Amino acid sequence: MKNLKKNYQIPTVHHHSGSIMQKKFEHYCENSVTVGVDRKLPTIHCLKNGNYAIWSDSCSCNQSAWDEYEVIKGSGWSDPFEIEEKDKKNCWYYYEVLWQKYNNENLKKNPKTRKLKGNYVGFHSWWAGAYGHILHDNLPLLAYLKANINDSFKFLMLNDPIFKNILKVLDEEFYNRVEWIDLGEVISVDGYLIVPTPDRYPCIMAKNLMTYLLEWISISLPKPVKKNNIVFYTRNNTTKCRVLNLENEQLIINNLKQFLIDNKIDGELIIFSGKDKNGKTLSVEEQISIFRSAHTIIGPHGTGLTNIMWCDFDNDTRIKLLEFYPGPNGYSSQVQAEFHGYEKVFRGLPIDYHIILYEPQSTLSETFVDLRDFNQAIEKMFLNK
């Protein structure tokens, strides 16, 4: 298993102002992680004849686990018998549930209670129904649990069609170990119940768990015949947020095409939107195929870039990534948030990571990048200039 921490490389910010933006970015990275949050590994709890329930299916990972002696505590975890105001704060994006249906008196009468015999792991993380968040927030933790918990244990997971599809494609044998449960359904386990309490911010912990996911992917997915794809991710005609100005994007793409020809860079340039020519979302298998054969990925911050997780990392040549980012406050943070990108999420990947910033005229809906910054970035990435 690779030591990814040793391979971590802070992203290079390319900007026409010189090194100013690089220094601001490094300062942001050093000071943006809350003290005490960034633990190395999740805490594992084991209950005998325990109960488990998932209360939210959106940006909160709210869930509960308990037996007759204790209720599991942790950020994003709630006492199902007594919900207090502080629990809402601890859950960050708190997703309100009709808790009166699940109070002490009614829990025992809850018609959604189901009894299962055997040993289980209760697993849930935030944004469990969002493709990108499944890849970079959920799968690393799931891979860690799969690698460290006996194969006799089955998993309790939220019944979500996107997650189910991804997991079935990745590892059908593991998929068959999962008992899919509904939102608010209380599972009473006749056996042992294991649950992990991760960080308040799962994406920060994910970097410490990425090794487990990369090994799982390496074992489960076939090796690419050739790594010759250069993927340019476009958000045009797929969303209304952070869409690169069409004229600006075409200029960037044309410039990239000419650069590849002039410098005899091996590879096929693929314009990727996550959809086919008819506007239908590409299957998980199709997306894996494109990125599994890629050596370079370029594009704006967004779900499409998270497909880098499917790349083949089983060699000493780093996958190249150029991500378009919101800048610091006062520059282009209005697009999303100051330096809001995948740096924390992708820290666990052995990649050659580069960044260019959206220009000041950018908005949440329409963005612009400077061609000078783009040229500087690809020259460094491909020619090391």
Image (spheres, rainbow, N blue to C red):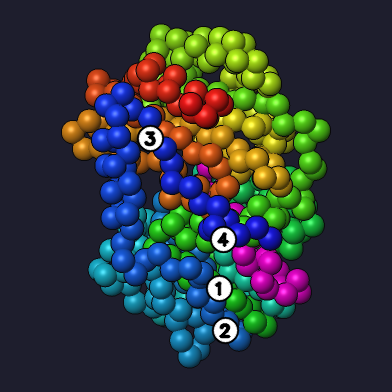
The label on residue 47 is 2
x and y, in percent, of residue 195 in the image: 55, 73
* Residue that numbered label 1 is attached to: 195
In the displayed structure, 30 sits above or below 68; it is above
The mark that comes first in sequence, 4 or 2, is 2
Query: 1 or 92: which is nearer to us?
Result: 1
* Residue that numbered label 3 is attached to: 13
Query: 178 or 37: which is nearer to us?
Result: 37
- Residue at x 68%, y 67% (from the top left corner): 147
The mark that comes first in sequence, 3 or 2, is 3
Task: Choose mark 4 or mark 1, whichever is in front.
Answer: 4
Q: Which residue lies furthest to the bottom in this view?
A: 69
x and y, in percent, of residue 158 in the image: 57, 57
x and y, in percent, of residue 2 in the image: 65, 58
Is label 1 in contact with label 2 (beta carbons under 8 Å)?
Answer: yes
The mark that comes first in sequence, 1 or 3, is 3
The mark that comes first in sequence, 4 or 1, is 1
- Specify whether 313 is left or right of 130: right
Is label 4 in contact with label 1 (beta carbons under 8 Å)?
Answer: no
Determine the image quadrant of residue 62: bottom left
- The magenta-colored residue range is 132-155
In the displayed structure, 254 sits above or below 323; it is above
Residue 150 visible in the shown view: yes
The mark that comes first in sequence, 4 or 3, is 3
Dot 3, how many residues are within 10 Å of its Cα: few (below 14), some (14-19), or many (20+)?
many
State the predominant SS element of the stretch in magenta: helix
Task: Choose mark 4 or mark 2, whichever is in front.
Answer: 4
- Residue at x 18%, y 33% (from the top left corner): 330
- Assess whether residue 139 is covered by the magenta stretch: yes
Q: Distance between the residues labelled 4 and 2?
A: 24 Å
